Amino acid sequence: MKVVMIIGYLVGSIFSLTGDFGEGTGGIEGTNIMTTAYVTPSTETIEMKQSRQQFKLQTVNGISLYDDPSSVIAKIGEPDFVTEDEYFKGVIIFHYPGMNVIFSDNILDYVEVLEGATTLLIDDIPVPATVENLKAALGEPDYITEDGIVFERDQALLKIFIDADSNKLKSITYFHRGME
């Protein structure tokens, strides 16, 4: 919107400096140029930009990517149970109803929202946990993969795993992009 307004001001300034506002049919052309300069973007574009700005992926279900085990417990309580990954030493999994929080060497690795979740809290705003509602809330995906879609905001990624046959939500993973 700012770019459109700046263009409008520049066009208006040119007409003011040259005094070429046109007469008769020339005035209509000048008006058309001014009108074109002030055309606003489509509603869909505005809504998508607002969605992308609204959801910065700072937290999912109250958890940030910078939480450690003690801060997760302080935020959402004790897990139902804790397991250690049998294949990877130092990987601890906090099991909550409908969600797992995975730590590697006490650093949050990712949050996994399991199939069957009805609502997802993104930046403390509830969003129904369906493919359609998440796409509507987050806008156009940044990546499309063979098993889902990915939304990226700065260093945070939210991947929605989708069943290829039914097009239904399988799970959601919230994780850090990491260093490249």
Image (spheres, helix red, strand yellow):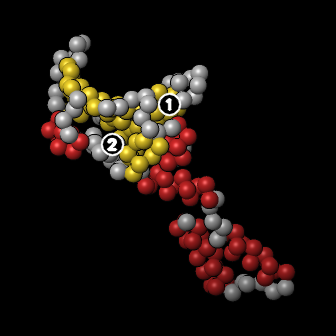
Q: Is residue 87 above or below residue 55?
A: above
Per the image, label 1 sits on a secondary structure element best described as strand
Please provide percent x and percent y for residue 133. 52, 43
Q: In the picture shown, does residue 102 fall above or below 122?
A: above
| Residue shown at the point (41%, 37%) measured from the top left | 158
Residue annotated with mark 2: 61
Residue 68 in sight in this render? no
Residue 58 location (% of width, % of height): 33, 47
Residue at the spot x=35%, y=31% of the render? 98
Residue type beneath disc 1: Leu
Mark 1 or mark 2: name the one nearer the start of the chain.
Answer: 2
**Residue occupied by mark 1:** 169
Give coordinates of residue 38: x percent, y percent. 64, 71
Depth check: give the residue in front, 65 or 133. 133
Pinpoint residue 122: horizontal percent, then vertical percent. Answer: 38, 46
| Residue 179 quadrant | top left
- Is 180 situated left or right of 84 in this image? right
Q: What element carries label 2?
A: loop
**Mark 2 belongs to which amino acid?**
Asn
